[in-house]
Amino acid sequence: MKENKEISALLQLIDDPDEDVYNTVSDKIISFGKDIIPNLENLWETVVNEDTQERIELLIHRLHLRDLTAEFEVWKNGTANLLEGAILVSKYHYPDMQPAVILQEIEKLRRNMWLELNNYLTPIEKVNVLNSIFYNYYKQKGVEFAYNNPDDYLINKALESKKGNAVNNGIIYLVL
């Protein structure tokens, strides 16, 4: 976002010790939307006060959360595609994540499975083909539930590391 006098003044007031002033300033900054994030990141790099840096980080997080909440509302009221929902969950921890990478990886898996399937296979043979490609060819592994490790629940990390818990691998399997 282009720097103007109003934005400059607001950014200078982030370190104000008065909570009322800070709340008013932060609400105004949030109203600018995601476009102000580069300005906040630039300010974070130049400020030496750790408390101010923490405030800036919280503002950036609030901006990402506001946009993500809006995306969840659109998803909920739209088609409610399971893959889109899993990508939105991943965007909570990785806001700059590119969904195209996940979609390409899923499409690659789907294409390989489609090539191996035909109408003459029984249902159990189809499941065996899917399992063979998913777990043997792509080497996807399962891990135990670790509630303190959120990466085990994120589709981008499961596809990247080839490891996921039962929920995450199940989501990928259902999408395929």
Image (cartoon, rainbow, N blue to C red):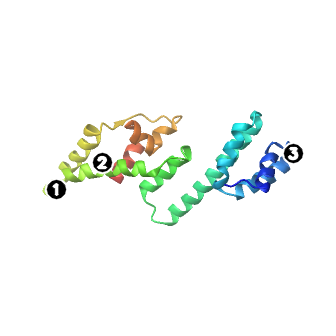
Q: Amino acid at mark 3?
A: Asp
- How far across and down, in percent of the image, does residue 51 sit? 76, 36
**Residue 46 at least partly seen:** yes
According to the picture, the residue beneath numbered tag 2 turns out to be 109
Q: Residue at x 76, y 39 (%)?
A: 52
Q: Residue farthest to the bottom? A: 78
Q: Is residue 13 above or below residue 78?
A: above
Q: Crowdedness of circle 2 by 10 Å Cα count: few (<14), some, many (20+)?
A: some
Q: Residue 118's mark?
A: 1
Q: Is residue 148 left or right of residue 4?
A: left
Residue for badge 3 = 18
Marks 3 & 1, CB-CB < 8 Å contact: no
Q: Is residue 128 left or right of residue 17?
A: left
Give the CA separation, mark 2 to mark 3.
Answer: 54 Å
Lower position in the chain sequence, tag 2 or tag 3? 3
- Label 3 Cα neighbours within 10 Å, binned few <14 / some 14-19 / many ≥20: few
Quadrant containing the N terminus is bottom right
Q: Quick one: which residue is furthest to the right in this view?
A: 18
Residue displayed at 43% across by 45% down: 155
- At label 1, the amino acid type is Asn
Q: Tag 3's secondary structure? A: loop
Name of the residue lying farthest toward the left:
120
Q: Can the viewer see residue 165 in this picture?
A: no
162 or 145: nearer the viewer: 162
User: Which one is in front in this view, the residue at disc 2 or the one at disc 1?
Assistant: 2
Sequence-earlier tag: 2 or 1: 2
Disc assigned to residue 175: none
